[in-house]
Amino acid sequence: GSALDFVEGLRRSGTAVPPFMLVTGRGDENVAVAAMKAGACDYLVKNNHFLDNLLPAVTKALQKVALLRDLEAAQRSTARNLHLYTFLAQVNLAATQIKDREALFRRICEVAVEAGSLRMAWIGLLDRDLGRITPVCWAGETAGYLDGIKIDVPDGSPASNGPTGRAASQLRIQASADIAADPTMVPWRERALERGYRSSAAIQLQENGFLTGVLTIYSAEPDFFSGDELKLLDEIRADISLALDAIAAEEKRAAAQAALVRT
C-alpha cells in the first residue's frame, strides 16, 4: 500500500502517529490534499529538485512541529490554571459559609476534585502526641489508597520523605512532578499509579502560625503542579489558613462569652 495507507493503518490500530513528511513520486494536487488531511507536515515530490528542496522543507517542518508543541503546552497550562482558579474561588466561598473546621476540610477535598478536576484529595491532621499525620477526610478516587497510611513528622524514614511529610516538616508546599520517576514516592508508587495518580502536591495547613495538617492532592497528568500552578496553590494555602484563623478566633470568642455567662 501507499504511505498514506500505512499512516491510516497506524491510526486504526491506536498507535500514535509522530510528525511526518510525505515523499511522493506523484506531484499532483490530489496527493498534496490527501497528505495534509492525513496530518503530514509537508510533502515533497521526487524530481530533479528533490535534494535542493529537502533541507528547507525539513527545517520548516521542524519549526512547525515546535510551534504546535508550544501551543499545546500553553493550552494545557491555561486549562490547569483555570481549574485551579475555580478551586481557589470555591475554597473562598466555603470559607465564608462554613464555620466548622471538620466540615470545611471535607468541602475543601470535595472542591479540589470537583472544581480543580483533580484525581484525589485528602487532608491529614497532625497528632501532636504521636507526631504523625493522620487522614481525616478525602474525596475522589481513593480505592483504599489511604488505608494504613503512616506519616511521622519528622522521622527521616522513606515513608515520611514524600510530599506530605516534607510539607509538614518544612512548612512549604511540596510537589512530585512525576510519581512514576520520583524516588521519594517509592513507598506508594505502585499503588498510586494503579489509581491513576501521576503527579501530586502537598500543602501545609497552618492555624495561628502553627501546623495543623496537610492537604495532599493528586492529578492524572504528570507535571501538573509547577510554575504558575504552585503560585495558585500558595494562594489556596493562604486562604485556608485565614479561614482556620477565623474559626479559631470565633471559638475563642465563644468560649470567653460562655465563661463570662457562667461567672
Image (spheres, grey):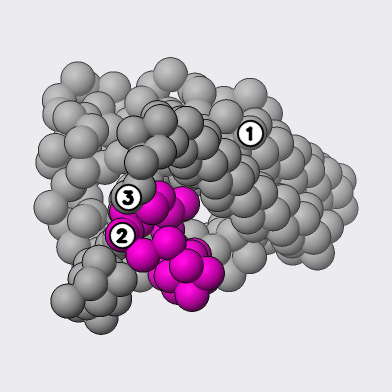
Residue 228's tag is 1
In x, y percent, where is residue 109?
53, 61
Q: Tell us which disc is closer to us: 3 or 1.
A: 3
Residue 39 belongs to magenta span: yes
Q: Nearer the viewer, residue 263 or 180?
A: 180
Q: Given contact means CB atoms under 8 Å apart, are the residues at marks 1 and 2 in contact?
A: no
Q: Label 1 vs label 2: CA separation?
A: 49 Å
Q: Which residue is mark 2?
A: 25
In x, y percent, where is residue 125?
43, 45
Query: Of the residues shown, which amino acid type is indicated by label 2?
Result: Gly
Query: Of the residues shown, which amino acid type is indicated by label 3?
Result: Lys
Residue drawn at x 66%, y 38% as measured from the top left: 232
Residue 177 belongs to magenta span: no
Q: Which residue is mark 3?
A: 46
Query: Magenta segment range?
Result: 19-45
User: Is 124 left, or right, of 64 in this rendering?
Assistant: left
Query: Of the residues shown, which amino acid type is indicated by label 1?
Result: Asp
